[in-house]
Amino acid sequence: MCANLDEESLICKVWETDQYPFFCRDFLADKDFCGSNRQEAEEILTFLEASTHPTKG
Ligand code: SF4
């Protein structure tokens, strides 16, 4: 999980600041990752994070 993500609100703590990474500025939302709403996005990203965790496999 990104160190800039507020774990309570799931809001980026550096959004619209000079610390906001270029990688994130260039990211374009994609339905495969973001789903159609916040709940779907959280489910997809939780699955992807668990599936790619270094201890998995
Ligand atoms: S938008 Fe970028 S910097 Fe902000 S929490 Fe997400 S990955 Fe981290």
Image (spheres, rainbow, N blue to C red):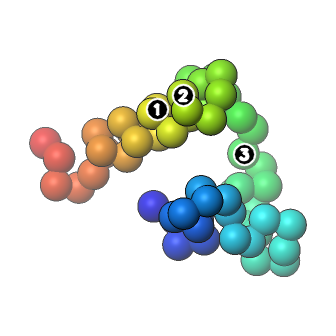
Q: Residue at x 51, y 64 (%)?
A: 7
The quadrant of the rendering that contains the C terminus is top left
Specify the amino acid type for callout 2: Glu
Specify the amino acid type for callout 3: Phe
Q: Residue at x 59, y 56 (%)?
A: 10
Of pointers 3 and 1, the one earlier in the residue sequence: 3
Labels 1, 2: front one: 2
Q: Residue at x 60, y 25 (%)?
A: 35
Would you say the beta carbon of the disc 1 residue lies within 8 angstroms of ligand 1?
Answer: no
Q: Which residue is the site of mark 1?
A: 44
Q: Residue furthest front?
A: 8
Labels 3, 1: front one: 1
Labels 3, 2: front one: 2
Report helix, strand or loop for mark 2: helix
The circle on residue 33 is none
Q: Which residue is the site of mark 2?
A: 40
Report helix, strand or loop for mark 3: loop
The circle on residue 27 is 3
Would you say the beta carbon of the disc 2 residue lies within 8 angstroms of ligand 1?
Answer: no
Would you say the beta carbon of the disc 3 residue lies within 8 angstroms of ligand 1?
Answer: yes
Specify the amino acid type for callout 1: Ile
14 sits left or right of 36 in the view: right
Measure how far apart labels 3 and 1 are at the Cα level.
17 Å
Of pointers 3 and 2, the one earlier in the residue sequence: 3
Residue 13 in the image: above or below residue 26: below
Measure how far apart labels 1 and 2 are at the Cα level.
6 Å
Measure how far apart labels 3 and 2 are at the Cα level.
18 Å
